[in-house]
Image (tube, helix red, strand yellow):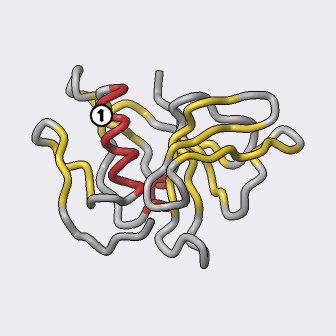
């Protein structure tokens, strides 16, 4: 689903992003699930360049490492894709399940909103994947 809306979205008064966009889903998910907020970014692929994430409860920044497409993410990790023909702004999806054969993600502004990404040779087999970032605890 593609939507050219530029409507700003908020959760409990905190800006989460542009309606129907993948970054908005990721920011809202991290706020609700982990009480964490990462900085607003121009494109989804820019998430890989963020080194800290703000903890709303402690009012402090936590280190937030980036893992290049090596190994496997955990539930709650953000998968980040580069800018490609398929993803002109990059893309981000949230890992909801990890098995030995695939990783399941939820996402906004791409496909049906949920898909399985196969695991091959110990890493995710998907074109354009740059990295993943996991919750810092």
Q: Quadrant of residue 121?
A: top right
Front position in the image: 100 or 63: 100
Q: Give how far across and how far down residue 113 sits, in percent.
A: 50, 50
**Mark 1 falls on what kind of element?**
helix
**Relative to residue 12, is residue 121 drawn left or right?**
right
Front position in the image: 74 or 118: 118
Residue that carries the numbered disc 1 in the rendered image: 31
Mark 1 surroundings within 10 Å by alpha-carbon count, few (fewer than 14), some (14 through 19), many (20 or more): many
Q: Residue at x 29, y 27 (%)?
A: 35
Q: Residue at x 68, y 38 (%)?
A: 103
Please tell me how many numbered marks the rendered image carries.
1
Front position in the image: 97 or 63: 97
Q: Quadrant of residue 1?
A: bottom left
Q: Residue at x 70, y 48 (%)?
A: 69
Q: Residue at x 37, y 47 (%)?
A: 25
Q: Give how far across and how far down residue 90 sits, in percent.
A: 51, 66
Q: Examine the rendered structure and indicate whether residue 122 appears above or below residue 1.
A: above
Residue at the limit of the structure toward the bottom, as seen here? 85
Q: Examine the rendered structure and indicate whether residue 4 appears above or below residue 23.
A: below
**Relative to residue 38, is residue 75 drawn left or right?**
right
Q: Give how far across and how far down residue 108 sits, in percent.
A: 44, 54
Residue at the limit of the structure toward the right, as seen here? 121
Q: Examine the rendered structure and indicate whether residue 24 appears above or below residue 122.
A: below
Residue at the limit of the structure toward the left, as seen here? 13
Q: Give how far across and how far down residue 79 sits, in percent.
A: 57, 47
């Amino acid at each position: 689903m593609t939507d050219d809306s530029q409507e700003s979205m908020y959760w409990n008064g905190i800006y989460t992003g542009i309606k129907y966009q993948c970054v908005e889903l990721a920011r809202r998910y991290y706020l609700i699930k982990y009480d964490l907020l990462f900085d607003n970014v121009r494109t989804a692929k820019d998430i890989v360049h963020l080194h800290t994430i703000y903890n709303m409860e402690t009012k402090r920044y936590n280190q937030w490492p980036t893992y290049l497409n090596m190994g496997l993410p955990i539930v709650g990790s953000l998968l980040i894709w580069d800018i490609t023909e398929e993803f002109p702004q990059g893309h981000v999806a949230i890992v909801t399940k990890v098995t030995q054969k695939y990783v399941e993600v939820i996402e906004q502004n791409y496909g049906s909103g949920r898909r399985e990404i196969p695991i091959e040779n110990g890493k995710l087999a998907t074109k354009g994947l740059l990295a993943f970032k996991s919750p810092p605890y």
